[in-house]
Image: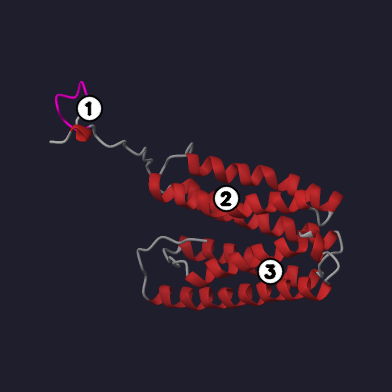
Amino acid sequence: MSEASVTPGTGGQAPAPARITTFGPSALLTPANGITVLRLVATPLLIALVMVWGPNWGTFLLWGALSFTDGIDGWVARRQGTTRSGAFLDPLADKVVVLGALVALVAKGIVWWVPVGIIAVREIGMSVYRSVVGRRGVSIPARTTAKVKTVLQDVAIALCLVPPLAHHTVVLATGIWVATAMTVFTGGQYLLDGRRAARHPSPTPPEA
């Protein structure tokens, strides 16, 4: 046995690897939920900065942080155990952050309200749809395209907050409409998946 594998006071045995704290499905106070709640709490600040500053590096950096932590809470949850509270809070935070930013951009006159309205109807409508079919025991697994949709929404909002692009209306409009098209497309996919799942129930838990 090499000296590197022996720790004094362990009887010549290598130390046990550090254990990762895990949480059961009913846990509420978890690190993942803490990150999610911080995202929710930071959303009013983001909206205020958009309304006061508009496209600004400070607003852009805050948006970047909120977008980055979108994946962090899910990663932490997968390592420490997913929970029912997290399954509710995480998609809620995603929608509140994205829709809050988009509504602020509309109020500031940076983007047109029509694509934002379409995105809002899809996001809220899909949440209601998932809730209704979920009560019937129907689970709709997440698609990879939903992750792409989220990235496109994040990028579109980021473009609107970068100062050098503030007056490039064609670029901003293109970004928003591309995100809108993907949002509608994935909504249609989920409706079809819901119909198939209703005919052939699956035990896979739903994701936002």
Label 3 to label 1: alpha-carbon separation: 57 Å
Q: Amino acid at mark 1?
A: Thr
Residue 44 drawn at (x, y percent): 74, 46
Label 2 to label 1: alpha-carbon separation: 37 Å
Mark 2 Cα within 10 Å, few/some/many (few <14, many 20+)? some
Q: Nearer the viewer, mark 3 or mark 1?
A: 1
Q: Camera-side residue: 155 or 188? A: 155
Residue receiving disc 3: 119
Which image quarter is the N terminus in? top left
Q: Nearer the viewer, mark 2 or mark 1?
A: 1
Question: Which of the 4 image quadrants contains residue 60?
Answer: bottom right
Image height check: is 103 above or below 179? Answer: above
Instruction: Compare marks 2 and 3 and give the one earlier in the sequence.
Output: 2
Residue under the image location 37 percent in, 63 percent down = 204
Question: Which of the 4 image quadrants contains residue 98?
Answer: bottom right
Q: Tag on residue 7?
A: 1
Label 2 to label 3: alpha-carbon separation: 21 Å
Magenta range is 7-14
Residue receiving disc 2: 69
Q: Camera-side residue: 138 or 187? A: 187
Q: Regarding mark 1 in the picture, which secondary structure is present there?
A: loop
Mark 2 and mark 1 in contact? Answer it, CB < 8 Å.
no
Q: Tag on residue 38?
A: none
Residue 35 magenta-highlighted:
no
Residue under the image location 76 percent in, 48 percent down = 58
Image height check: is 49 above or below 125? Answer: above
Specify the farthest residue to the top: 9
Mark 3 Cα within 10 Å, few/some/many (few <14, many 20+)? many
Residue 29 drawn at (x, y percent): 49, 36
Mark 2 and mark 3 in contact? Answer it, CB < 8 Å.
no
